[in-house]
Image: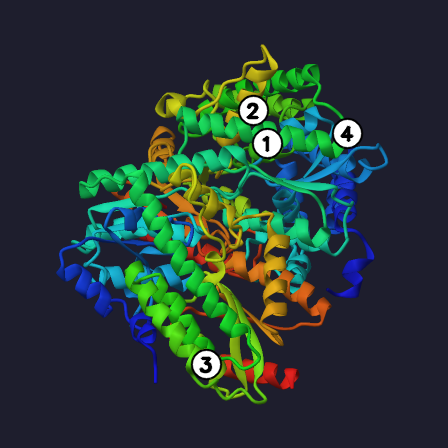
Amino acid sequence: MRPEIKEYNFDWMLGSLLKTAANIGNCSEKEIKTLLNYVPYYKGTLEVLLREGEVGTCFIRLLDKYFDNILNAHQNRKKIVGITFCLSPTLFHAMDIVPVTLEVMTGLCGLLWKRGAYDYLDHGVELGFTETSCSSQRGSLGAYLAGLGEEIDFLVCDTPGVCDTNANAFAFASEFMEKPFFQLNYPYIIGDEKTKKYQLDDYKDLIVFLEEQTGTKLDQDRLREVLQEVDVQDDLLAEIEDFYCLIPSPIPILFNLFMYMGRFLFSGMPEYTELLTLMLEKVQDNAKNGLSGLHQTQEKARIFMCYIDHYTLDMKFFDWINQQGIAHLGAILSRNFRDNTRYAPDFQKSTYGIDTSSLETMLTSMSEMNATLPMVRSIRGPFDQPNMWLEESISLARMYQADCVIYNGTPGCRNTWGMVKPFAKEVEKAGFPVHIMYGDAFDDRVESWESSVNRLQEFFSIRGIL
Amino acid sequence: MKSEFYEIASQINHPGLQAWKTEGKPVVAYSCSYVPAEIFHAAGILPMRLRGIETDGMEIGDAYFGPYICSFPKCILQLAGHGKYSLLDGVVITPGCDSMRRLYDCWQKAGEDHQGIVPNFFHYLDVPHKTVHHRIDWFVDRVTDLKSALEQQFSVQIGGEALHQSITVYNTGRKLLQELETLRQQEAVPLTGSEAFAVVVASTVMPRDDFNKALSHYLKTLKHNPTIEHQGKKRLMVVGSISDDMDLVSLIESTNRAVVVADNLCFGVRHDKSDIPLNGDPVRALAESYLGESTCPRMFGQYKKRLEILKEKIAAHRVEGVILQNIRFCDLHGSENGLFERDLEQMGVACLKLEREYGPLTETGRMKMRIDAFLERLA
């Protein structure tokens, strides 16, 4: 790694940037215009976020709070846990443990820095990761393994049985940093009683592990409080997502990102409730006025991202689809599969509810909530198994009247790359044109955004969508 | 002269398999070392590991798998698509790794375009990634499901006594393989690494009773054989991703400056160290023993155990250098090799990390050059 990159901790650099950005809500238009001259390389990100008005600035404040929590955790005598995006942070918040979500940290490097997470990605390889391992963990882990972040006290992942590359990154980091590691393990089916029991047993083991690491017992009342907040958030999410059924969709493109990123970072915390409340107000307002969520353009097409979004560089993906008049109907990351959603009846055996009446019901609720998180739910078994990736993608694409389905991921995602071609064939059979993007959502060097755009344009043109 | 094991290990449709089929007996292939072969043996079925040798193209493998996938499952699919596995009566796939588990999806989908390539018995065996109490119970249930599915498909009963007998037969094979390992520990080894590896590969495809007899005889021969010319040769160990052909080991030994005296590979003796207990419920014994062996990096969080296994082998086999190889896109072995390299080098054991494509002598020149350079370092 270049010596200058080691001058400052990467989480501090991201946090400082976001701290400055969080104050932008108080700036005059002139001040903002001047400020943009000083941030030429992430001006796009800032502009796209600010375009969302109060919701955008609320999201920046949320990110600022997230970094405040991390950077001050040890000073506040809290432990830091390294987790993955498909593991709910709810339990950690309830136990006053500060979660660091590796993929979000890598994604933010791509969104906010001209160099993205390149130096850290490469450093991960220098230390022994394969260069084809998943970039989403490797980026931020490269920084942590170099000692360029607040010290992580222990690691928890829930991807064994779901995504080997993800789980492997945590196992590697645990050995390299000599930190304790816990894994939740998922069977290949979802929704049957045996599987539910297995998941619950695993979740109980996790709580024992966390109690050992923190030296404190799980406080039931605090857990209840956090879960009740999740309950409120789930209602808000369900209501927002309902609006995806409208044509034009009144939901701005970035709201999809806000929904899942907020959930990954602050599920069960009031900061996320505030964000969702503002989002719902905006969406309701747009719907009442018959407005599309797109900025300064008409809705011309609707896409359903069957996997993840594209995070490099400078939010170009989100800006580009807005410019083209494409409404974004969500990704695998967006849906939570709560039992009160519009799509829940199609997936009755694989949704979750929240019951806070006793410790046992709360633990059951949490283990089932975790079992329905992105990837954990969809790609744990054969792609065409009931309730899995194919079924849910087609069902949601139909419900939201998508014009096409787009796959975007990372080369490190062996699991989806192992089946995306048969998956695409089946989705095409169901009547949806499918485009497979070959880039890396976190590393622009794999395929430049310009090349990705060329291929996207070709797809939209040849398939007669735009 | 090459042994009969070498001939068997060098081809998929080997003579023992042909003879078995001629007798009208069923064959079920499986994808991973976590599948208890004893279950098939007890049912009168020949269990054999799925292999990727003899592949001469990749158009079918590439048509279903994406580009960022290890070439081993692609080779298996390619062979299946060309009918090479049409002799199989069944296939069992496990989530050994993400690429291999998707063989289950891709093979079935390929079957829609290539008629007759999916056997009637096509089973997914879920294998947990750790060994605590409820996971063992879960795996016991999955092995029981596999047993029931075989009973139904092949109209057989797999009783406790038959299972105990099969475990005994397999344990005998394990003991013999350990004897072979002991010979490889000698100062003057009586066989090359490629010959030893051929024995191990053959153990995964031959009828076990025949294998035991043949290995027993071979061991006697070896004990009376002169040792191979080893003067000045470096003693190496090969570790890492799946390898089911002898060419990699032969390539190393073709330098005439090295002999491979130990390995720790997926097709290898690493899974055959301990006997399966004969007391108690045989299905539970199988499940506990197979899952309990955390020899594969798919068992996350067990790195230190695996490092200990390497250290023991390095000491016992007097290994002077370790080749840590992984197939491209194999993150599990690839990154664990990174940890091994760090820890073994710290101990003073020289390591070579080598990424490669699966396949007979793909990239021979590049690999040979790196192996030569490594041997120069050892000299």
Which residue is painted at 53% across and 56% down in the image?
A: B332
Q: Is residue A27 above or below residue A46?
A: above
Q: Nearer the viewer, residue A304 or A84?
A: A84
Mark 1 vs mark 4, CA separation in Å? 21 Å
Q: CA distance from mark 2 to mark 3?
A: 53 Å
Question: CA–CA distance between discs 3 and 4?
Answer: 54 Å
Whether tag 1 and tag 4 are in contact, CB under 8 A, the answer is: no
Secondary structure type for disc 3:
helix
Along the polypeptide, which appears first: circle 2 or circle 1?
1
Amino acid type of disc 4?
A: Gly
Nearest to viewer (mark 2 / mark 3):
3
Q: What's the CA distance linking mark 2 and mark 4?
A: 21 Å
Residue at 64% in and 66% down: B341
How packed mark 3 is, by other alpha carbons closer than 10 Å (few <14, some 14-19, many 20 or more), is: some
Q: Is residue B72 above or below residue B113?
A: below
* Residue A444 in view, yes or no: yes
Question: CB of mark 2 within 8 Å of CB of mark 4?
Answer: no
- Do callouts 2 and 1 mark residues in contact (Cβ within 8 Å)? yes
Counting residues from the N terminus, which is met first, the one under dot 2 or under dot 4? 4
Which residue has dot 4 on it? A215
Horizontal side, residue A86 vs residue A416: left or right: right
> In the rendering, which numbered label is found on residue A88?
1
Q: Tell me if B363 is positioned left or right of A215 in this view.
A: left
CA–CA distance in space, label 3 to label 1: 49 Å
Residue depth check, mark 2 versus mark 4: number of the one nearer the observer: 4
Which numbered tag is attached to residue A366?
Answer: 2
Give the residue type at disc 3: Leu
Q: Secondary structure at mark 1?
A: loop
Circle 3 residue: B251
